[in-house]
Image (tube, rainbow, N blue to C red):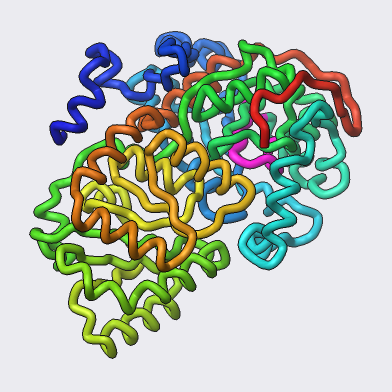
């Protein structure tokens, strides 16, 4: 840890320093918010006495972008780790499901993602920010399940889950409808994977919201979500992001220089569509990269083989010696911990992984909808820099190239959002709700009147 990192955590208690996920952002007046802590010896009580031989926890996402699935997998992995440390019985099963697999008609998540990356992104932005986020609010109902997802109702009748954890609004609403239609009672835990709460979460029917920040909790309170149903846990990431990689070993293995500022250009993931505009902005920047003599750029195209090949051909033709293209990286956590700076789009999961890996960020491109909320949150706290054009990016890179302290400042400010143990906290909180849920009244749709929103969108 650098001197600046040490300063950022100097005022924490020993317990907080050991487990950063228990530390919550300070309020404007200096107060610290409280977090819901679930005692480790209580989380398995209901499972231990359950008559079901193999209680089932469902962690459900939607394959729209990559972050919702990554968050779901992180929570599922947390259950595996808690079996060893918190006496969760081995017989407890965890299944990770894509809610779109249960749809009446096939839904292409990659095409759906084009709503907030293609020509309709300004419309999507207005819809995301203003639909059911004021006084008229969405409570939940059976509509989603009756119309589009009857197959999930059948799944619930057959498997009778003990709990459902949802990392996407569609998954949450489908779980609510299935609970009403089947009569199977189970807690529904909603885990937004961005830094604001969308209006279509089933506010009245959710048994627990696990959110990233106090600002998100402040959004939920005027929506009449009881305090007991809000836990500030952070956004779940895989456990590798909270460690510290051997920088020398990683750079040697990848053939990267030790004496340069290593800059990751995160230009791809599981689905290519969300990165179209990001890649266009980077292509305008590439001719200027040669001028950063103390930087080495590592391009990550994700699973897009065509884009990877085109980058390699371009760099070879330009004879660009301070840029490298890596194929799909299996251990992103290790790579992110070993490098010095990332250029990326403001997806909720990706920026959270950077925070947990203590990797300074430059957010590139105009952002809309949930990504705009992520950008506002990170930049308002000084945890990231934001640029919208190639020229702005070049100027910002020049500043960081000439003033290394700028990166250390981003690290210090990022500590306020860093909660690398969020997945375990969500798993514990979810298990604590098993057996406590009462049957809900059935209704097709439910709207209700809320208080004055805490934040102006």
- Label total for image: 0
Up the image or down, 340 lies above or below 53; here it is below
Q: Please report the residue visible at 45 percent of the width from the left and 39 percent of the height from the top.
A: 378
Q: Please report the residue visible at 48 percent of the width from the left and 65 percent of the height from the top.
A: 278
Is residue 398 covered in magenta? no
The C terminus sits in image quarter: top right
Res. 162 in view: no
> Depth check: 42 or 213 in front?
213
Where does residue 351 sit, x and y in percent of width and height? 42, 45
Q: Please report the residue visible at 42 percent of the width from the left and 65 percent of the height from the top.
A: 267
Where does residue 309 sit, x and y in percent of width and height? 37, 82
The N terminus sits in image quarter: top left
Q: Which residues are magenta?
A: 161-172
Q: Please report the residue visible at 9 percent of the width from the left and 53 percent of the height from the top.
A: 248
> Depth check: 410 or 231 in front?
410
Where does residue 260 sit, x and y in percent of width and height? 14, 60
Up the image or down, 283 lies above or below 257; here it is below
Is residue 165 covered in magenta? yes
Res. 393 in view: yes
> Depth check: 341 or 152 in front?
341
Up the image or down, 220 lies above or below 245; here it is above
**For residue 128, side relative to residue 349 (left or right):** right
**For residue 281, side relative to residue 410 (left or right):** right
């Amino acid at each position: 840890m650098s001197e600046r990192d040490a300063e950022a955590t100097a005022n924490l208690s020993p317990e907080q320093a050991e487990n950063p996920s228990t530390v919550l952002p300070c309020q404007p007046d200096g107060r610290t918010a409280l977090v819901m802590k679930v005692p480790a010896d209580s989380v398995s009580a209901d499972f231990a006495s359950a008559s079901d031989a193999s209680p089932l926890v469902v962690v459900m996402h939607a394959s729209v972008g990559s972050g919702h699935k990554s968050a779901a997998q992180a929570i599922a992995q947390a259950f595996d780790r808690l079996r060893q440390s918190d006496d969760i019985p081995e017989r407890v099963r965890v299944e990770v499901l894509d809610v779109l697999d249960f749809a009446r008609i096939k839904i292409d998540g990659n095409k759906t993602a084009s709503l907030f990356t293609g020509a309709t992104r300004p419309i999507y932005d207005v819809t995301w920010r203003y639909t059911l986020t004021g006084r008229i609010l969405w409570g939940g109902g059976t509509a989603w399940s009756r119309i589009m997802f009857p197959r999930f109702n059948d799944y619930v009748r057959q498997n009778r889950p003990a709990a459902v954890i949802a990392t996407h609004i569609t998954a949450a609403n489908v779980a609510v409808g299935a609970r009403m239609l089947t009569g199977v009672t189970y807690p529904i835990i909603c885990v937004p994977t961005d830094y604001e709460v969308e209006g279509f979460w089933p506010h009245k029917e959710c048994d627990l919201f696990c959110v990233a920040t106090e600002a998100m909790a402040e959004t939920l309170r005027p929506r009449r979500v009881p305090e007991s149903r809000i836990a500030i846990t952070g956004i779940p990431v895989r456990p590798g992001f909270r460690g510290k990689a051997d920088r020398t070993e990683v750079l040697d293995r990848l053939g990267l220089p030790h004496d340069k500022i290593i800059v990751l250009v995160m230009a791809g993931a599981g689905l290519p569509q969300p990165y179209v505009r990001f890649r266009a902005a980077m292509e305008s920047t590439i001719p200027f990269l040669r001028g950063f003599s103390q930087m080495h750029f590592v391009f990550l195209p994700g699973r897009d083989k065509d884009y990877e090949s085109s980058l390699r051909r371009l760099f070879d033709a330009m004879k660009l010696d301070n840029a490298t293209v890596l194929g799909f990286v299996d251990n992103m956590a290790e790579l992110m911990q070993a490098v010095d700076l990332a250029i990326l789009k403001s997806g909720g999961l990706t920026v959270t992984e950077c925070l947990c890996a203590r990797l300074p960020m430059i957010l590139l491109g105009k952002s809309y909808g949930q990504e705009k909320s992520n950008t506002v949150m990170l930049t308002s706290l000084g945890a990231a820099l934001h640029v919208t054009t190639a020229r702005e990016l070049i100027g910002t890179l020049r500043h960081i190239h000439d003033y290394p302290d700028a990166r250390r400042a981003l690290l210090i400010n990022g500590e306020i959002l860093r909660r690398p143990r969020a997945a375990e906290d969500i798993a514990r909180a979810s298990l604590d709700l098993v057996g406590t849920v009462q049957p809900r009244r059935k209704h097709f749709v439910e709207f209700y009147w809320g208080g004055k929103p805490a934040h102006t969108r």
